[in-house]
Image (cartoon, coloured by chain):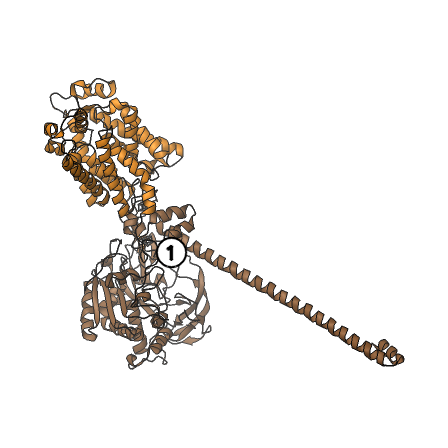
């Protein structure tokens, strides 16, 4: 298949050999599961269970709220220990709404679970509804509710579904393993999604450092649907960036600030396709995911099918513990993953990797001044000039940085990866993006407040005016009455009039 | 478990094995063959001058850092001051007195680099600022060249005699020579025909090997080219500046040579003589003072080439690399402002690109 060139990118050390040959294994049931109510982009799910309640595997724990949200299900059967808060799977370590479940050891599926005989007989709405009900979100790490993405056909004219099997982050091998071990199930999910999207072109892009996965998927594709094309991609970070993947495969560039749907293409992850297959064929909601546990400090790196809510510590224990004190504990890959504050936090839908990195792997050095070497400019896949944006942010000119394209930065970290000055460029960009978002919200709030204030003044004005008018009316009426009375008075005998007056 | 304050840190948590000292080290490694050749060919006085220049650069850097209250060790160890002194030494007449090296290094480090704010902040290439300042202030010392007198050759000064030359201000008349560019300029000034005189003055082979009169480290075109290719292979520099600069010089020289061979020398002459190659691979490519975008670098390189040719051909100076680079350094901010890479999903003007007709948004 013809591929197209994209600009920039880097070749980080893959380090995938640590876990690439390890088949997906299922660790024993943990003693406790901490299931956060927000494991997706969008509104937090609202709890549907009480403390002490018994639940079966797959029962609804919390229901999605609003259009962009996702429900959360019981990863195993057991008893609800609490509906409260627990440290988040996030660098901040702040507590977030979480349901704690004590497994009963039976791992018994709910009897309400039911698959569909023929998913292809369902219409698009019904498929999206089932995907929504199963709590499926983008498992590549973006965690955007998949059903919303399946509904994009309402707004866009779509023609292609791209499956992002590039897995360009170093260390991670969970998609690789899944494609090796479950190619038929993945392709079934792909076809169901394509059916829902109403697209005819199906492309699965896989980086060529995964020959086994490419082979397995090619065989499976030949057996299921010849329309599915398996495309080996050059191994280059960030191949997995949606827009860059699409450009490599189709040569088409997504407009800035737009979606790939703008050019008729939807991108999903293989693990998401697998989850869709499970949800449609068997009715299983998303209660587990494959996670790569790896890094120089892990005794036995591997790929685990992890129940959502399992604590990080449980995974480390299962992998033989730590061989040395890691300098970094990371959720996701080393390029775009985030540091975890402790081993107590639970695994969530979006966590595709758990890395314990030793100092020789992170290669951290103290930052030096920028020497304008332009390595970052060459590396940036988005055509930005990172050194200049960072320099502007450093002196507080956030608006200038935005003018230089800050909001087009995908945060891939290629620039920081190659910087000989070890300047934390992404940290600058994240700070500035956050700050701009805050300002945007503040501004919005300001306009909102102003609008409300204006409304209130208008209301008060109206009220006053109404009062004045009412008063004027009463006066007029009173005057009219007086006049009428006076007239009547004139007509009546004086004595009577006197009486009337004293009576009033 | 002890984990460094995670909340404040963003990725990536892996890094290419690169650092500023490594970058500077690679440049010095690339300079090493040409430098050793120069030191050998011009003997002990050159060795002394080289040592004085780099030592002065390091001391000046340390002093400035101390005064500015910056940590001395990490900045001194980044290798940039050493490289500046080194480059400056390569562009000096090999038997120049010691104070030329000292004053040059002081100008380079203090005025051209630290006054601007230290590493990465300077607008102009420090070594070239020093060279131009020296040339204007001490024209005699800066244009007194010698014919090669290799180390250990019979007629070459021994270490003691060399001390007298470098530190004692002894005359060097017995060895004095003129650079090719200087000679040609003189002859042309006297109205001689280039086609007649050039074969006697210029042998492309010795010019390429470097066994000719010239600055300490500029003579061996081959070894400099070797170093430059090494830097390209190691991705310390990119091809745009050298190719654009050399290409422009070659084109102009070829054009003018065709127009009038008696007055204008051909491209080979310009490419191998003087500081052309050192300039194209090591000076114009200086990371700090050249543009950051690929297209910007093409413009910058072409500008350098044009100016080198113009200065050599039509001004009072026989050599123009230093002036050319400084002039282009001054335009780097302008180039960087106007010439940027195209942002993904946008056209060159920064507007979002059209999404095409086969996938319009549904009404
Ligand atoms: S890579 Fe680092 S040192 Fe080089 S220009 Fe970019 S920010 Fe500056
Ligand atoms: S993090 Fe942003 S600026 Fe840096 S390489 Fe990626 S897209 Fe470019």
What x and y, as percent, mark residue B73? 33, 36
Res A241 seen here: no
Q: Position of residue B162 (x, y in %)?
A: 20, 21
Residue at screen point 34% across, 34% down? B113
Please say if B9 is above or below B357: above
Q: Quadrant of the C terminus of chain A?
A: bottom right
- In the displayed structure, A24 sits above or below A423; it is below
**Measured from the top left, where is residue B133 in percent x and y?**
30, 28
Quick check: A150 left or right of A96?
left
Q: Which chain is orange?
A: B
Residue B202 point in image, percent of width and height: 12, 30
Chain letter for the brown colouring in the rendering: A
Q: Name the residue that disc number 1 marks.
A: A407
Q: Foreground: B208 or A134?
A: B208
Q: Residue at x 27, y 36 (%)?
A: B325
Residue B251 visible? The answer is: yes
Quarter of the picture holding the N terminus of chain A? bottom left
């Amino acid at each position: 298949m013809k591929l197209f060139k994209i600009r920039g990118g880097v070749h980080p050390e893959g380090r995938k050999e640590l876990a690439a040959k390890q088949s997906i294994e299922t660790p024993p049931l943990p003693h406790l599961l901490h299931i956060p109510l927000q494991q997706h982009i969008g509104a937090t799910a609202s709890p549907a269970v009480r403390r002490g309640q018994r639940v079966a595997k797959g029962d609804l724990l919390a229901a999605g709220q609003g259009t962009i949200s996702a429900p959360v299900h019981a990863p195993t059967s057991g008893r609800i220990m609490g509906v409260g808060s627990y440290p988040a799977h996030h660098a901040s370590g702040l507590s977030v709404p979480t349901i704690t479940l004590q497994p009963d050891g039976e791992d018994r599926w709910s009897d309400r679970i039911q698959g569909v005989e023929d998913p292809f007989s369902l219409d698009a709405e019904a498929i999206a509804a089932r995907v929504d009900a199963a709590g499926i979100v983008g498992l590549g790490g973006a965690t955007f509710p998949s059903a919303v993405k399946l509904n994009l056909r309402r707004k866009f004219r779509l023609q292609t579904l791209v499956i992002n099997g590039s897995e360009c982050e170093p260390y991670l091998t969970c998609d690789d393993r899944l494609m090796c071990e479950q190619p038929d199930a993945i392709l079934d999910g792909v076809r169901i999604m394509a059916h829902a999207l109403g697209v005819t072109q199906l492309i699965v892009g896989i980086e060529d450092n995964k020959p086994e996965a490419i082979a397995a998927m090619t065989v499976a594709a030949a057996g299921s649907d010849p329309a599915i094309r398996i495309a080996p991609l050059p191994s280059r970070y960030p191949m997995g960036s949606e827009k860059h993947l699409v450009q490599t495969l189709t040569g088409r560039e997504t407009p800035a600030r737009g979606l790939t749907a703008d050019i008729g293409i939807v991108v999903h992850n293989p693990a998401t396709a697998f989850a869709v297959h499970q949800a449609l064929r068997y009715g299983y909601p998303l209660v587990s995911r494959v996670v790569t546990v790896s890094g120089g400090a892990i005794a036995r790196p591997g790929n685990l099918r992890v129940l959502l809510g399992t604590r990080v510590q449980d995974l480390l224990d299962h992998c033989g513990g730590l061989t040395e004190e890691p300098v970094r504990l990371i959720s996701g890959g080393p390029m775009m993953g985030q540091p975890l504050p402790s081993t107590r936090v639970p695994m969530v839908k979006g966590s595709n990797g758990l890395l314990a990195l030793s100092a020789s792997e992170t290669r951290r050095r103290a930052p030096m001044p920028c020497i304008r070497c332009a390595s970052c400019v060459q590396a940036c896949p988005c055509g930005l000039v990172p050194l200049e944006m960072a320099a502007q942010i450093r002196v507080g000119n956030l608006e200038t940085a935005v003018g230089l394209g800050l909001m087009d930065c995908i945060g891939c970290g290629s620039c920081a990866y190659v910087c000989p000055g070890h300047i934390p460029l992404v940290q600058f960009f994240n700070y500035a993006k956050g700050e701009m978002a805050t300002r945007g919200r503040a501004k919005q709030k300001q306009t909102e407040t102003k609008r409300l204030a204006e409304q209130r003044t208008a209301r008060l004005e109206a009220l006053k005016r109404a009062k004045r008018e009412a008063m004027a009316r009463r006066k007029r009426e009173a005057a009219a009455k007086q006049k009428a009375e006076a007239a009547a008075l004139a007509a009546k005998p004086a004595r009577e009039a006197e009486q009337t007056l004293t009576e009033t | 478990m002890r984990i460094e304050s995670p909340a404040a840190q963003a990725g990536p948590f892996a890094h290419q094995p690169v650092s500023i000292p490594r970058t500077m080290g690679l440049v010095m490694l690339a300079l090493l063959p040409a430098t050793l050749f120069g030191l050998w060919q011009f003997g002990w006085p050159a060795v002394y001058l080289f040592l004085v220049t780099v030592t002065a650069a390091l001391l000046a850097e340390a002093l400035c850092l101390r005064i500015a209250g910056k940590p001395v060790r990490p900045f001194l160890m980044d290798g940039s001051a050493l490289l500046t002194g080194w480059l400056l030494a390569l562009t000096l007449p090999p038997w120049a007195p010691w104070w030329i090296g000292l004053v040059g290094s002081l100008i380079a480090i203090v005025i051209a680099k630290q006054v601007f704010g230290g590493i990465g902040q300077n607008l102009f290439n420090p070594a070239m600022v020093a060279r131009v300042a020296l040339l204007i202030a001490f024209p005699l010392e800066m244009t007194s060249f010698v014919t090669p007198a290799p180390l250990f050759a019979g007629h070459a000064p021994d270490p003691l005699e060399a001390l007298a030359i470098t530190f004692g201000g002894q005359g060097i008349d017995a060895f004095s020579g003129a650079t090719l560019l200087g000679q040609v300029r003189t002859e042309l000034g006297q109205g001689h025909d280039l086609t007649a005189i050039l074969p006697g003055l210029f042998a492309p082979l010795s010019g390429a090997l470097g066994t000719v009169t010239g600055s300490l480290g500029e003579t061996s075109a081959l070894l400099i080219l070797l170093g430059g290719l090494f830097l390209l292979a190691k991705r310390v520099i990119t091809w745009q500046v050298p190719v654009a600069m050399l290409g422009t010089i070659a084109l102009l020289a070829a054009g003018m040579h065709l127009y009038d061979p008696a007055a204008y020398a051909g491209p080979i002459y310009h490419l191998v003589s003087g500081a052309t190659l050192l300039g194209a691979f090591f000076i114009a490519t200086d990371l700090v003072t050249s543009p950051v975008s690929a297209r910007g670098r093409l413009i910058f390189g072409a500008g350098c080439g044009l100016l080198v040719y113009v200065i050599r051909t039509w001004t009072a100076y026989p050599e123009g690399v230093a002036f050319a680079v400084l002039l282009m350094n001054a335009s780097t901010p302008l180039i960087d402002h106007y010439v940027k890479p195209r942002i993904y999903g946008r056209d060159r003007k920064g507007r979002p690109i059209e999404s095409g007709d086969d996938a319009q948004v549904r009404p």
